[in-house]
Amino acid sequence: MGKSNGNVRMSLQTLRVLESFLENPLEQISGADVHQRCRIASGTLYPILLRLEAAGWLVSKWENIDPSAAGRPRRRLYRLTSTGLKRASEVFASFNRGVLA
Amino acid sequence: MSQTTEALIIALVRRAARTAPSSLSARLEEEWLADMRERTSGLSRLRFAAGCYWASLAIGLEHRPLSVPVASPAQADGALVVEPPGFFSARAVTFGLVLSVHAVLFCGLMMAGSRLFKPLEPPALEPRVIDQPRTVITPPPVTLERFLTEYIPPSRITVQDPPPPVPPKGPDVVPQEGPIGPQDGTVGAPPREIVRIQGRAGPAFPHASDYYPDASRRMEEQGATTLEVCVNAAGQLTADPSPTESSGSGRLDAAAIKLAKAGSGHYLPSTEDGRPVAGCYPIKIRFQLQN
């Protein structure tokens, strides 16, 4: 699979997920937020999120709330890592050059 | 959305999360339940739950159960721990699974189809005797155009012997007493009768239908032409046949002359006292259409 060494197989859905993170690289967003931005079904979205996290492009952590007090479960929030930001930028820059990285 | 539907969707999401690798099931369950609440409509939540099922299958193929201890800090936080790729890639395993499912479905359909749809068997043939009077078809009488050349009966001709020569009278010839006639005392031979049989077309004479003009057939012209033929003792023509009586059709007359010429050598000559002699005689050739 090549995920542990930081390589991710690029697909159209993966690019759309990365694009939603690149809108604000420092923002922490949940899977529901990504779905609202790129309209990818849950069956495709979550494997991509886990794949990018395994490759080190994303990092995730629980939302810092008390579920009993909030009355809802905690959300899992994802954020681009510095590696992910660099690699994602390279990927989109390669598209501008006409060559896929 | 009713509480029953809500409970059903939550149960589906939890079951999908448990289908995922055990190291991720707790994290995915909480994450998916939280994200599910972001969906507003019941149908959207149902689609989300179904997608979670598919996601858990894909995640299960990509991430095997962790070998790290359960109490490790990374797993307690739900962090993803990746193990090295196995011998088969997830894509190959997925392809194999899909192929297997298709094979099972195909075999099932074939077996069900063979039981539901049996091949058609042709009906058994049963011999049946039908009592019907046999119809005897009588062939029409055969008419031979060969005999359309009419036979003209022979004629009997009486031929008289020429009178004896009269001796020349001269001055030195003394007329003799007595009756004038032959010296043998006979008064004169009675006329001798010669049996003459007129000739006709022989058995090998050409068939009239072979010379029937096509135009006359189409116009349904029929008729008989009488020709005068002159043949020698061998039955061969000695002169061109000449028509003596027309059929009324120039085509038929020409065809009759052509037929008469083709029949040279196949004529039966006239006979006198049984001896073939050369001579001319009429012959009638009839062209008649047959149905």
Image (tube, rainbow, N blue to C red):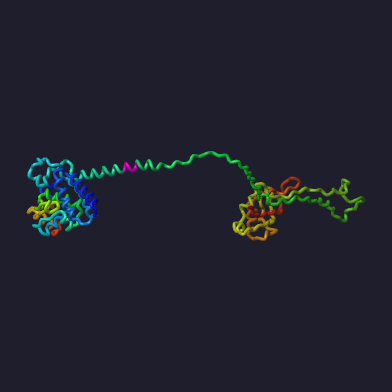
Which residue does the image show at 89% across and 46% down from the upper left?
A: B185
Q: Is residue A13 left or right of residue B185?
A: left
How many numbered tags mark residues here?
Answer: 0
Q: Which of A90 and A78 lies nearest the eye of the viewer?
A: A78
Q: Is residue B128 left or right of residue B166?
A: left
Residue B118 appears at what percent x and percent y? 40, 41
Q: Which of B135 and B133 lies nearest the eye of the viewer?
A: B133
In the image, residue B220 sits, relative to residue B96, either above or below, namely: below
B107 within the magenta span? yes
Q: Is residue A13 left or right of residue B267?
A: left
Q: Which of B173 and B114 lies nearest the eye of the viewer?
A: B114
Please tell me in which quadrant of the rendered image residue B44 appears: bottom left
Residue furthest right in the image: B177
Which residue does the image show at 67% across and 56% down from the upper left?
A: B241
Q: Which of B241 and A52 lies nearest the eye of the viewer?
A: A52
Which residue does the image show at 54% across and 38% down from the upper left?
A: B127
Residue A86 appears at what percent x and percent y? 8, 55
Dividing the image into 4 quarters, which one contains the C terminus of chain A? bottom left
Residue B159 appears at what percent x and percent y? 80, 51
B93 within the magenta span? no
Note whether residue A49 is visible: yes
Residue B26 appears at what percent x and percent y? 14, 46
- Principal SS element in the magenta part? helix
Range of the magenta residues?
B106-110
Note whether residue B57 is visible: no
Please tell me in which quadrant of the rendered image residue A96 appears: bottom left
